[in-house]
Image (cartoon, grey):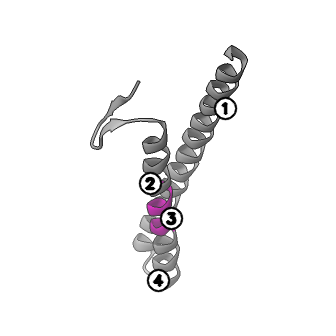
């Protein structure tokens, strides 16, 4: 059974993995960008701002990895349950 995503319409298991992978890639890109900007600034306020940005992107990346792991575990359990029923 597919469920509705907030912005992506129906979300099935395969589609949800794709959305997570896109979010992980985008977050990794933003994290690289934040590290690059951090390396270029010297103003203490900007240094602090980029530290917060890096922290936020790392937290988001960690969250997305946990979501992907949860989704993979659910898919594995579903596959094992389907094999046991046959």
Q: Are marks 2 and 4 in contact (CB under 8 Å)?
A: no
Picture residue at 45% right of the left edge, 82% below the top: 41
According to the picture, the residue beneath numbered tag 3 turns out to be: 51
- Residue contact between numbered discs 1 and 3, judged by CB atoms under 8 Å: no
Q: Nearer the viewer, residue 51 or 18?
A: 18
Main structural element of the magenta stretch: helix, strand or loop?
helix
| Mark 4 neighbour class, 10 Å CA radius: few under 14, some 14 to 19, many 20 or more | few
Mark linked to residue 23: 2
Q: Are dots 2 and 1 in contact, CB under 8 Å?
A: no
Seen at 47% across and 72% down, the residue is 47
For residue 42, which numbered disc appears in the image?
4
Q: Is residue 66 left or right of residue 2?
A: right
* Residue identifier under label 1: 76
Q: Nearer the viewer, mark 4 or mark 1?
A: 1
Instruction: Pick out the residue farthest to the top.
Output: 85
Q: Which residues are magenta?
A: 23-31
The location of residue 17, given as percent across then percent down, is 50, 45
């Amino acid at each position: 059974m597919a469920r509705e995503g907030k912005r992506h319409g129906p979300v099935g298991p395969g589609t949800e993995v794709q959305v997570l992978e896109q979010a992980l890639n985008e977050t990794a890109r933003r994290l690289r960008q934040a590290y690059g900007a951090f390396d270029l600034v010297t103003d203490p306020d900007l240094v602090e701002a980029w530290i917060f940005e890096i922290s936020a992107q790392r937290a988001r990346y960690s969250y997305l990895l946990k979501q992907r792991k949860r989704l993979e575990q659910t898919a594995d359990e579903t596959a094992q349950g389907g094999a046991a029923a046959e």
